[in-house]
Amino acid sequence: MEQLCTVFGEGMDKSSPLKEHPNPMFQRRSFVSLNGPWAFKKDKCKDKPASFSSHIIVPFAVETQLSDVNESVRYDDYLHYQKEIDLPDDFVGNGLLIHFDAIDQIADVWVNGFFEGHHEGGYSPLVVFIQYAQKHTVIDVLVKDDSSSPIYPRGKQSDSPQGSFHTSTSGIYGNVWLESVPSDGYIESISIMPDYDKEKLHVKATFAGIRQFSSIEAYYRGQLVARTSFDYDGVAELDFKYDFYPWSPENPNIYSLSLSSGDDVVSSYFAFRKINLVDTPKGKCLSINDKPFFASGVLYQGYFPESGLTPPSDSALINDLTNIKKAGFNMVRVYQNVEPLRFYYHCDKIGLLVNQDIVAGGSFSSPLTLLTRPFLEFNFLSDANNRLGKLSAKSRERFVANLKENVGTLKNFPCLFMWTLFSEGMGQFDTQLLTDTLKAMDQGRLVDSAAGFYDKKCGDFMSRYGTGPLKSKADKKRALLLYVGAYSFKVKDHVTDESFSFSRHFLSYASLNSAYRSLYLRKIVPLVEEGKLAAVVFREYSDVEEETDGLFTYDRKILKADMNDVKNINADLFEAFSHAHSLK
């Protein structure tokens, strides 16, 4: 595969990459990043090596250029990491939290020779607590990854990447960082529950160890607007009757929070926003803050050529999201991946709604199913049998555990307005039951139960790929969501040797942009004018390896689409929606 790189990777400081605080939703001032060089060895032995033969740049996966390893990982490989550090003096003797934001796939952690943590699954964080931190600290991590395993979520990863499946992501690929906390007790987590209708905020805090007197303050644009203390159950209620400023893509108003428990102080933020479906004379449509709105989005896989599923820098994320917003889109679908937490933070800040996938796993579908799936509905296939990839009870249990972990990690971000439970039938099972489970866990958000194919007539959306006659009819209980595009254009010197697309191939910028205009103006806009369509998502923001259907090339150096056209077409969609629903 030809080696490509974005401008963000070309200038990266490997001694301290991604040095910003990884979690603006829950941060302490004591943050210390452990990103950078770690001792590393890949071998076939589970035991800790006597010596380390090389280094790796954390937090980049073993398979990536920026890791300085750039090697494939087999199912029988073991990945050994070690980091020796001298902690700041004010850490010593206090409690120590070691955060691993993402490790794929099975990980064990030792601190100063003592086993401290085990984690399975590549799309949720691991946090290790050490009660009394030592000045000189040695962290060892052992990782094993099998991208072909039918047990664990893997999204679009493959150990034989081709077409729409991409290079595996193995080992530590999320930020690693430290926080100092009081050894006898600290704030462990918070659940933020804004009540838009009552203009109130409820916060549920959990505490580790001894709980001290705990309180919370809320600020809007630097001004204190509310404060209270937590009750016996760890719940606080704040009233914003006189300082109520809702969040929307047009006005992304954010409140800051400061929580304290004894000497432990945590900064966070929240927003008031309300998302639901409403009935109109022409069918179901989306509503934000009790106003109908149309969602126009772009699919985002989150891959970078030099760093895989890890952005090379915070600026790389900001660049992508700002481009999406400037193009007139108000929504992004995070496709078969969980992004770094700063991704959602930036979406909150700029006003970009997020449709978040629950990452798929299970066994791979048969070649015949893959080839025919885009053209046949296959609704007669039961999701209670093995045909859609969930062959074992352990695989199903791991999917449910991953779902719960994803909700727990992302539930506080205002931008996240809907979940995609299953995509394209990958590993799909018990769709109705899991839709009910997800909606019960996260009641303020919508659910697309089965994106693309294998509709089981549940959830909030009937989502379809394409714009054919049979795919433009919504039922009376759900809103219609269309996925369109997959228009391939291969730009010389900015693409790998192969080129893949589910749809059409183009040979010039002009023909690609003409097709884009025709798709939206002749097919999508009329559906919006008729009141049939609630949302549309274009595939996709950028090329990914062999997939060449992005608005940008994989290295983000060439814009293939006419961005003024895209912006104007999005404006036409919103105008058509306003007229269709008499919003003017």
Image (cartoon, rainbow, N blue to C red):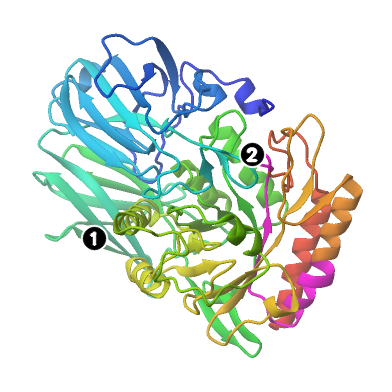
The region drawn magenta spans: 520-546
Rate crowding at label 1 as few (under 14), some (14 to 19) or many (20 or more) other CA atoms within 10 Å: many
**Residue 541 on the magenta segment:** yes
> Which x, y percent locates residue 310?
51, 35
Residue drawn at point x = 34 percent, y = 39 percent = 27
Residue, disc 1:
236
Question: In this orientation, which residue lies closer to the viewer: 387 or 153?
Answer: 387
- C-alpha separation, residue under disc 2 versus residue under disc 1: 37 Å
**Residue 536 on the magenta segment:** yes
Rate crowding at label 2 as few (under 14), some (14 to 19) or many (20 or more) other CA atoms within 10 Å: some
Q: Is residue 544 left or right of residue 229?
A: right
Asked where in the image residue 318 lies, by quadrant, the reply is top right
> Which x, y percent locates residue 519?
81, 64
Residue, disc 2:
319
Asked where in the image residue 468 lies, by quadrant, the reply is bottom right
Q: Is residue 169 left or right of residue 291?
A: left
> Which x, y percent locates residue 296?
66, 63
Kindly report which numbered mark, 2 or 1, lies closer to the viewer in this rendering: 2
* Disc 1, SS: strand
Total marks shown come to: 2
Image quadrant holding the N terminus, namely top right
Question: In this orientation, which residue lies closer to the viewer: 555 or 241?
Answer: 555
Q: Is residue 415 visible?
A: no
Q: Answer above or below: position of 514 versus 340.
A: below
Question: In this orientation, which residue lies closer to the viewer: 304 or 105?
Answer: 105
* Disc 2, SS: helix
